[in-house]
Image (cartoon, grey):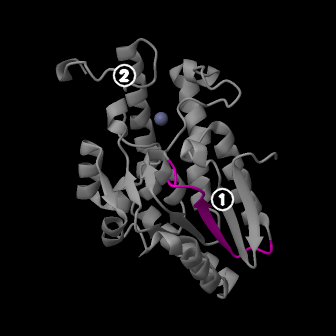
Amino acid sequence: MQLDHVDYDVEGQVGVITLNRPEAANAQSAKVLDELDWAWRQADEDTRVKVIVLKSVGKHFSAGHDMSATNDDDPTALDEPFLTPEGQYDWETRNYYHFAKSWRQVPKPSIAAVQGKCIAAGLMLCWPCDLIIAADNAQFSDPVLMMGICGVEMHAHTWEFGPRKAKELLFTGGSITAEEARELGMVNKVVPLDDLVPATMEMANRIARQDAFALRMAKKAVNHAVDVQGYTTAMDAIFDMHHLGHVRARVLTGGMPSIAGLGAMKDGQR
Ligand code: ZN
């Protein structure tokens, strides 16, 4: 695959996936997502790799989905899959939800290194990872309620933030700091910005010294325990609620899958 926005390197036993689109705050276009998925597959299949690191270049980890570029060739158009509710449902299933779910299921341990802003679908890059190391300037938010939807497509908020904080962040669109995210258990470690990549690589190398199969089973055990609590079952159902929001927005806007432009509309009309 021709990589324009993502780098994949192997450093020792660590596969390093780098999102490299700083000029767009690492927003995720369709091409970015395909490249990220390709890199995850490489790291999964690469026999040299025991641990995967996901990081990004620039001030911000990721500004979320690139709403203007579901098709990089024509970023101004509302693309074909988004013309109908069912088209959008299928497109988001593959490109947003299934990618994030499948990255979580890669058997090798993974660590996300997060700096600056991590907004909405930015969460869908770091949440699938097993560990999150955050720079002290990191901020996490999911303000998509303003678009008429109940949160990003991978609705792990309840597990990641805890139910009360999840509601507060969704209701207000507010953000939490790296330190708050660490207190909530979402982030493993907070380090100074300059130490982010070295600290992440140090953790990755430490994990890489462990037995690969034991690591795989430890990961599977925790993921399985969370799934028994309903993690994936809940997210599958909430994905459909998310699309109820998109469909309702189409009705209110006469076709657009978001009500973001209807800020002046009275609450009672929504
Ligand atoms: Zn959506």
Residue at (36, 71) in percent of width and height: 182
Question: Residue 261's quadrant in the figure?
Answer: top left
Q: Position of residue 181 (x, y in %)?
A: 35, 65
Q: Are marks 1 and 2 in contact (CB under 8 Å)?
A: no
Residue in the foreground of this view, choosing between 6 and 195: 195
| Secondary structure predominantly adopted by residues drawn in magenta | loop
Magenta span of residues: 47-62
Check mark 2 vs ligand 1: CB closer than 8 Å? yes or no.
Answer: no
Q: Which residue is mark 1?
A: 18
- On the rendered structure, is 18 left or right of 131? right
Magenta span has 54?
Answer: yes
Disc 1 element: strand
In this rendering, is residue 63 above or below 57? above
Check mark 1 vs ligand 1: CB closer than 8 Å? yes or no.
Answer: no
Q: Position of residue 204 (x, y in %)?
A: 61, 78
Q: Which residue is mark 2?
A: 261
- On the rendered structure, is 236 left or right of 269? right
Residue at (38, 61) in percent of width and height: 160
Disc 2 element: loop
Residue at (33, 69) in percent of width and height: 179
Marks 1 and 2, how far apart at CA = 33 Å
Specify the quadrant that holds the C terminus: top left
In this rendering, is residue 157 above or below 184? above
Question: Residue 241's quadrant in the figure?
Answer: top left
Give the amino acid at mark 2.
Answer: Gly
